[in-house]
Image: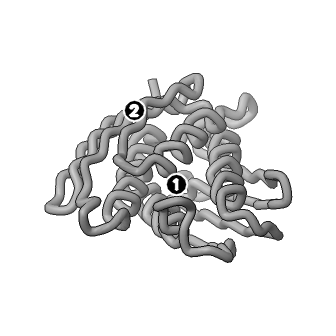
Amino acid sequence: MRTATITRNTNETQIDLTLNLDGSGKAEISTGLGFFDHMLTLFAAHSLTDLTLTVKGDLHVDGHHTVEDTGIALGQAFAAALGDKTGIRRYGHFTLPMDETLVTAAVDFCGRNCFVYDAGFASQKIGEFDTELVHEFWQGFAAAANCNLHIIKHYGTNGHHIAEAIFKAVARAVRMAVEFDARQTGIPSTKGTL
């Protein structure tokens, strides 16, 4: 079973997270931020991971710590659940249309952190959710998962559609990357380690 449980307690957030890479897309999410819950539920559904997550954050300040720390915890869970990465595809990519929006995500679970993000929003808010937090979430994820993650918005105007396309595109790319490759018998690197 490729699973991980992460508990992260700071003065700003208390996070309990359980991840199953070989799930069916089930999600039980409670972060205190309705839009963020929606995005994480979409992520689980499209990555076919099972995700249970409870976050108690300092929302009286704003959503920043809750979102960033959740990204870090989810990245840690992926790193732990993947283990030495024997037999996985390692790379994944997906270009996803969401109405007028088109987003590409590409991931490499290579053991090196690199995050590239070119996906601006015209508005600063989606409801009560700060759109800049999409960047913070995925930056935290990439750093903690120790992966390369590139996110590019080709075009799009509606903030909800852009955020949804990003979460779904990354989910689909991650799903591809963590799947087992029947032809890959060892670690997918000429170095012998990732």
Rendering coords of residue 80 (x, y %): 39, 43
How packed mark 2 is, by other alpha carbons closer than 10 Å (few <14, some 14-19, many 20 or more), is some
Q: Secondary structure at mark 1?
A: loop
Colour scheme in use: one colour
Name the spot of residue 138 as percent of width and height, x first. Answer: 52, 62
Residue type at numbered disc 2: Thr
Q: Quadrant of residue 38?
A: top right
Using the image, determine if residue 100 lies above or below residue 180: below
Q: Nearer the viewer, residue 86 or 165?
A: 165
Left or right? Give the position of 63 relative to 175. Answer: left
- Mark 2–mark 1 CB contact (< 8 Å): no
| Foreground tag (2 vs 1) | 2
The Cα atoms of the two marked residues, 2 and 1, are separated by: 27 Å
- Residue drawn 26% across the image and 55% down it: 57
Residue under the image location 48 percent in, 41 percent down: 82
Quadrant housing the N terminus: top left
- Please state which of residues 62 and 4 is positioned toward the viewer in this rendering: 62
Q: On the image, numbered disc 2 is attached to which residue?
A: 52
The answer, for residue 16, to whether it is visible in the render is yes
Instruction: Residue type at mark 1: give it.
Output: Leu
**Residue drawn where x is 31% and y is 64% of the image:** 65
Is disc 2 placed on a helix, strand or loop?
strand
**Residue 194, numbered label:** 1
